[in-house]
Image (cartoon, grey):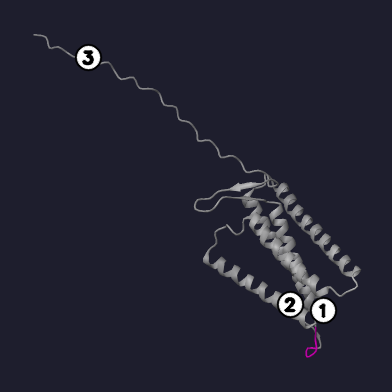
Amino acid sequence: MTDDIALTPSATVAPTVATAPSEPPSAPDGDGVTEVASPGAPTRQRWPLLGPTLCVFGAAMWAYVAMGELATTYVFFARGFLVGEGTAVLFVLATTGAVWWLTLRASLASAPARSIPRAIARGLGIALLAFLLWGFVTFVVTAFGQSSHKNLDGKITVCLLLVAAAATFGGRRLTGLDLDGKTPRERNVSRALWAGVALLTLVALVALVAD
């Protein structure tokens, strides 16, 4: 007696080909507009050259105007000016340099440079553009003040402070500094620095009114 054996055709298994994940597109080299999207954060275009330039210009203009006012305000009981000339120059340079370094780091983080020479060139470009913008604005307001028959020093000072504030906040937005996540310690340091800026600006305005 022979047992019947049922034969079933073997299942055909299609070969699987492992595909390598595609590499994300490399970031542009910093001079264009970069769109950054992070989970839970709003998407905004960042300007890695224009934003830092405005920030550095705003910081330099604010420090120049504030220190210029304090360095030319004479205090009778102290028999001298509120701030010495050397201290004022050092403060302007330190403030401008710190803001330049901070915004350059943010620019390189949002749009990394393809090489170290390109990163250095971007940093020098930001500094040069900010200096040219500062020089142009200073030249224009100085020429305007000298050509007027009235004393416009007070109005010019206030206008320059407003220009510096607008450039700083606009540059922060274009750079994306207001979107970056910060630790509680960094937020506290940032608040302390802004409080110091506000206090120093208030002192300069009081000195301007009292002069």
Which residue does the image show at 77% across and 68% down from the upper left? 159
Q: Is residue 25 above or below residue 78?
A: above
Mark sitting earlier along the chain (2/3): 3
Q: Mark 3 points at which residue?
A: 7
Mark sitting earlier along the chain (1/3): 3
Q: Mark 1 points at which residue?
A: 72
Q: In the rendered structure, does residue 201 fall within the stretch colored magenta? A: no
Q: Do the residues labelled 1 and 3 touch (CB within 8 Å)?
A: no
Mark sitting earlier along the chain (2/1): 1
Q: Is mark 1 on a helix, strand or loop?
A: loop
> Within 10 Å of the Cα at label 3, are there few (<14), some (14-19), or many (20+) other Cα atoms?
few
Give, as a single range, the part of the protein colored magenta. 74-78
> Within 10 Å of the Cα at label 2, are there few (<14), some (14-19), or many (20+) other Cα atoms?
some
Which residue does the image show at 50% across and 35% down from the upper left? 21
Q: Name the residue under label 2.
A: 205
How far, Cα to Cα, is label 2 from label 1?
A: 13 Å
